[in-house]
Image (tube, rainbow, N blue to C red):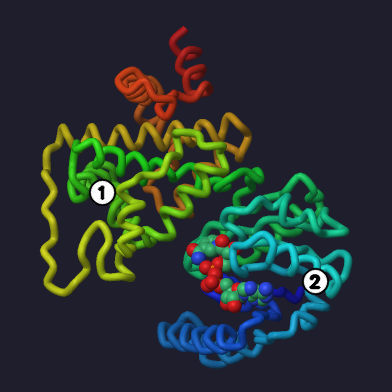
Amino acid sequence: MKIGVLGSGTMGTGIAQVAAQSGHEVVLADSNTAALEKAQNSLKVTVAKLVEKQKFTAEEGEALLGRVLFTADKKAFHDCGMIIEAIIENLDIKHQVFSELESIVSPNCILASNTSSLSIASIGSVLKFSDRIIGIHFFNPAPLMPLVEIIPAVQTSEETLKKSKEIIDSWKKITVVCKDTPGFIVNRVARPFYGEALRIYEEGIADFATIDWAMTHIGGFRMGPFTLMDYIGNDVNYTVTETVFEAFYYDPRFKPSFTQKRHKEAGFYGRKTGRGFYSYQEGAAVPEPKEDAALGTEIFMRILAMLINEAYDALYLGVASRKDIDLAMKNGVNYPKGLLEWSEEIGLEKVLSVLEGLFETYGEDRYRPNVLLKRLVKNKTV
Ligand SMILES: NC(=O)c1ccc[n+]([C@@H]2O[C@H](COP(=O)([O-])OP(=O)(O)OC[C@H]3O[C@@H](n4cnc5c(N)ncnc54)[C@H](O)[C@@H]3O)[C@@H](O)[C@H]2O)c1
């Protein structure tokens, strides 16, 4: 099957590489010829590196590049079986291109969007045959991150879901299916990793380095929240939080932080600007954490309990299956364990008691324990 990718930016180029590596003929289109040129050069460099690392031979590398057509003309999509859109995150522009795509492709061509924050139902609303719309959400960098979230909208047919999942599975990705709800699985369930860490800092309980130390050394996470926010970029990470907060009708669980907002406003985006929560200038002092085991455990348990609460909320509301929620967090954001399996390892009673303690102390809706978690504990102890 020929695969179309619209948008040759960060995500589109990565998705095109994954599809071509899996043997597909790929059409990669962009309205901006400079972006196309950049994509072509970057794919050449990537393939050369992979040949050097002996991931495949020089001939295979050449063949891979030969399978990708770079074009500014969307008409080249006419014989594609699936198109994945990865253009700018703007609903009006996405509507225009989806209408245009439908006039070019055959009626059974799957039309997918890689959107992170728009609803798939809203994107598909402009289609005549809207049962072919689906969300196919890759993570950055697409060739390296194993997870892909597959999001059927209310319009999506079983056939579209089945075919899309088969295709992405055949690209050796780990697919999870989730409801068309804000943040899908990963960008929803992961919010407390950042939000609760920021809140702990704002309350003066600990500094950035100590919170990061608690999450890595006690919690076993690969990166602490502040190191990770600096890595993702405070501009990007703040915007995701704000979007999820608005999309959940301002649920206080997702409330953004002034600390992160100010860092964003100051241009302290993180690694890419040389300064975020930490400084990345040459010779900058690395702040030392306060290695206090009791404090570290309290920080870790508070953030983990909030993450687990979010995972139970997603499970309770049918966003995804238990298995898929755990797979998503392990493979989309490299968590050391799935949150639901982790909750059982620690004991649901313990998790609930941390949440109840926070709820009682602060009296804020943000800390309300999920009803499924409460029920499971109650049923166990009855
Ligand atoms: N960057 C990420 O980490 C990430 C992760 C997952 C999903 N996404 C989603 O993927 C999509 C693309 O993100 P990105 O980071 O690759 O963006 P990007 O800015 O790197 O690339 C977007 C590309 O789309 C092109 N474009 C814009 N309007 C177009 C049009 N009308 N027709 C054709 N091409 C057009 C631009 O020229 C640009 O090359 C967005 O929907 C985003 O939410 C991004």
First in sequence, mark 2 or 1: give its number. 2
In the drawing, does residue 324 fall left or right of residue 209?
Answer: right
- The amino acid marked with disc number 1 is Thr
Q: In this view, does 252 lie above or below 140?
A: above
- Residue 66 x %, y %: 64, 90
Comparing 51 with 74, the one in front is 74
In the drawing, does residue 99 fall left or right of residue 176?
Answer: right
Label 1 environment density (alpha carbons within 10 Å; few <14, some 14–19, many ≥20): some
- Residue 261 x %, y %: 36, 52
Task: Find out whether the residues at labels 2 and 1 contact each other: C-beta distance under 8 Å.
Answer: no
The residue that disc 1 covers is: 216
Residue drawn at the location 75% of the way across and 80% of the way down: 74
Label 2 environment density (alpha carbons within 10 Å; few <14, some 14–19, many ≥20): some
Q: Is mark 1 on a helix, strand or loop?
A: helix
- The amino acid marked with disc number 2 is Glu
Residue drawn at the location 76% of the way across and 66% of the way down: 98
Residue drawn at the location 17% of the way across and 34% of the way down: 295
Residue found farthest to the top: 382
Q: Is residue 318 above or below residue 68?
A: above
Residue drawn at the location 44% of the way across and 45% of the way down: 190
Q: What element carries label 2?
A: helix
> Quadrant location of residue 279?
bottom left
Count of all numbered marks drawn on residues in the image? 2
Residue 66 is labelled as none
- Residue 176 x %, y %: 60, 50
The residue that disc 2 covers is: 100
In the drawing, does residue 164 fall left or right of residue 316?
Answer: right
